Image (cartoon, rainbow, N blue to C red):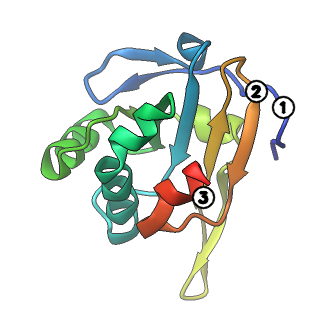
């Protein structure tokens, strides 16, 4: 598992529009890289909408917001359109980013074990260093956790 002070692993995947996005593209900017399990599910929607509703406050603090799930570009497009999300969602269909960031882990629901994306958020500074890792995300108040 990555720790505060580690270099944020670089990656290159496509966003919801099929455009390539690399972590290294954001050097010089603070990045909120948030991982979520699935588009258009209750917790993920609450989290995305909280970030959307407070997007101007995040921009004012100099943050770039990037959402990541293993859903594909088409799913991300629908999610963005349905909830008017102002930030890009990265389509990690090959699980490159979730593996590099250590968020692809064993989960359990109703006694059934399976692999899935943990709801973790990484705050990355202008130099590409992990400044904070939020592992207990409050989906309805996530922005407050970021701006604390």
Q: Residue under label 3, please give it.
A: 118
**Secondary structure of the residue carrying numbered label 3:** loop
- Residue 60 spot, x, y in % from top left: 43, 33
In the displayed image of the protein, which residue is found farthest to the bottom?
110
Q: CA distance from mark 2 to mark 1?
A: 6 Å
Residue in view at x 17 percent, y 45 percent: 84
Q: Nearer the viewer, mark 2 or mark 3?
A: 2
Q: Quadrant of residue 70?
A: top left
Nearer the observer, 89 or 57: 57
- Residue 105 spot, x, y in % from top left: 68, 57
Question: Is residue 91 at least partly visible in the picture?
Answer: no
**Secondary structure of the residue carrying numbered label 1:** loop
Mark 3 / mark 1, whichever is N-terminal: 1
Q: CA distance from mark 2 to mark 3?
A: 21 Å
**Rendered image: mark on residue 6:** 1
- Residue 3 spot, x, y in % from top left: 84, 43
Is disc 2 in contact with disc 1, using a CB cutoff of under 8 Å? yes
């Amino acid at each position: 598992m990555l720790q505060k002070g580690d270099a944020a692993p670089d990656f290159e995947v496509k966003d919801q529009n099929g455009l390539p996005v690399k972590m290294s593209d954001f050097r010089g900017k603070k990045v909120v890289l948030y991982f979520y399990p699935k588009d258009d599910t209750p917790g993920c929607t609450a989290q995305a909408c909280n970030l959307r509703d407070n997007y101007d406050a995040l921009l004012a603090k100099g943050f770039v917001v990037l959402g990541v799930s293993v859903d594909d570009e088409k799913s991300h497009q629908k999610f963005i359109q349905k909830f008017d999300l102002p930030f890009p969602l990265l389509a990690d269909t090959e699980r490159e980013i979730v593996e590099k960031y250590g968020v692809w882990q064993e989960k359990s629901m109703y006694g059934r074990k399976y692999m899935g994306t943990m709801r973790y958020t990484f705050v990355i500074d202008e130099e590409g260093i992990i400044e904070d890792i939020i592992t207990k995300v409050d989906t309805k108040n996530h922005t407050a956790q970021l701006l604390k």
